[in-house]
Amino acid sequence: MAERLFPKEFLWGAATASYQVEGAFDEDGKGESIWDRFSHTPGKVLNGDTGDVACDHYHRYRDDVKLMRNLGLKAYRFSISWPRIFPSGGGRPNQKGLDFYRSLVDALLNAGIKPVATLYHWDLPQALQDKGGWPQRDTAEYYADYAAYMFEKLGDSVALWITHNEPWVVSVLGYGIGVHAPGIRDLSLAVKAAHNLLLSHGKAVKIFRDLKLGDSKIGITLNLTPVYPASSSEADKEAARRYDGFSNRWFLDPIFKGRYPEDLMEVFGGAGYLPQIDSHDFDVIAAPIDFLGVNYYTRTVVQASEANRPLMASQVEPKTNMTEMGWEIYPQGLYDLLTRIHKEYGGPLIYITENGAAFKDTVNESGEVEDNQRIDYFKQHFIKLHEAIRDGVKVAGYFAWSLMDNFEWAYGYSKRFGIVYIDYPTQRRIPKKSALWYRGVIEENGV
């Protein structure tokens, strides 16, 4: 019997993203995305991998939904490919693209699984990037039109709508550091992109409210990391404060407090990075949301660094207890993060929209995947999640990242996060030991 029971209506699920699993990159009228362009550019993705086929979820979704049902999932978080709906970003919608997502939602509902849809998980139509992409305010208008169309067509058949997945990654890794699509290296553009992503989020929330979509809820997903100083020195403590502003508060504060953090305004202002902020922008961005999606993988430890401007802070890389991504396994960070959000941001309703780990998974002679490390990872995080709920944090659900092994962005197919193993040459699905263990967690609603 489970020692730690979760709240009665706790929503247990798993998550994926369109470009990572769907494949069918140029089928049925879909337009080119920035990840199509980026992955087809030599040298951008490990081993030259692309999402052209990925897990072929576009063609195999019915079987995948049956698999989800067999694993006992209560919810499935997927993302919608914007260029599958609007091939050029706007204008005339692509009916076949809409039909795919409507069929997926219907299959989920028929299986008793709640659909949770993310409107944007990084695959911007390339046609909009050609016009400047997220650093351009016009992109937020295109996004608002796209969101309105999806709300009208899928409406309250989707239980939870998520406007964006990880705008920090979109802006910083895509436009600042350039390791993600569209591969631009300009921190001033990254800050502008972040502002317009937040602006587009707020616009979508208002449209959603105006449509009055029954019991459906709307929120946003942020990748958040608790930041700890490498030492007790004042320099490291200040560095941690700045890095926390960069990673966490730059997105949390405008959404929940209607302003950017002053210390980061000084940092970015001094570097000439501030975006254009119109008088009503924060009224739009701070539109009340029903929930906050939190993606948590690891903590960040930082030290003061003259070299890393303008933050004057650099990460201290972990040396032990790491996943295949080189990320430290640190369950306590989940508790620290959740209790901090609860305390500092008014106790919002939270869903853990991603949490998981990549390990070197292999199929043994019996045709099974014994991923005991992943089970231990989940178990330790569930314990800390349960402690946070016990201490008053309002967490309503958890989504394992990910349902299946998939295209892991710049790492291609070299990293496996799934609870279901994908044999890419045959597209065979093999539930790992962690999937069967997770099914037991869901059945008992606890660990």
Image: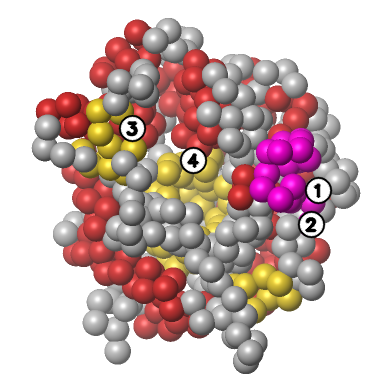
Compared to residue 410, the image places residue 14 above or below, namely below
| Mark positioned earlier in the residue sequence (4 or 3) | 4
| Element on which disc 3 rests | strand
The image quarter in which residue 271 lies: top left
Which residue is found at the position 21% from the left and 64% from the top? 387
The image quadrant where one finds the N terminus is bottom left
Number of the front mark, 1 or 3: 3
Mark 2 belongs to which amino acid? Val
Mark 4 is on which residue type? Glu
- Magenta residues (range): 35-53
How crowded pointer 2 is (Cα within 10 Å; few <14, some 14-19, many 20+) is rated as some
**Sequence-first tag of 2 and 1:** 1
* 133 is higher (above) or lower (below) than 393: above
Which mark is in front, 3 or 2? Answer: 3
Residue that carries the numbered disc 1 in the rendered image: 25
Q: Mark 3 packing: few (<14 Cα in 10 Å), some, or many (20+)?
A: many
Rendered residue at 33%/51% (across/down): 318
Residue linked to disc 3: 314
Q: Is residue 126 left or right of residue 140?
A: right
- Say if mark 2 contacts mark 1, CB within 8 Å: yes
Residue 166 is labelled as: 4
At mark 1, the secondary structure is loop
Q: Amino acid at mark 3?
A: Ser
Q: Report the quarter where the C terminus lies.
A: bottom left
> Residue 284 lies in what quarter of the image?
top left
Drawn side of residue 221 relative to residue 314, left or right: right
Please report whichever mark, 4 or 2, sits nearer to the chain's N-terminal start.
2
Q: CA distance from mark 4 to mark 2?
A: 24 Å
Type of amino acid at the residue the image marks with label 1: Phe
Which residue bears the numbered disc 2?
53
How far apart marks 3 and 2 lie (CA) works out to 37 Å
Residue 10 forms part of the magenta stretch: no
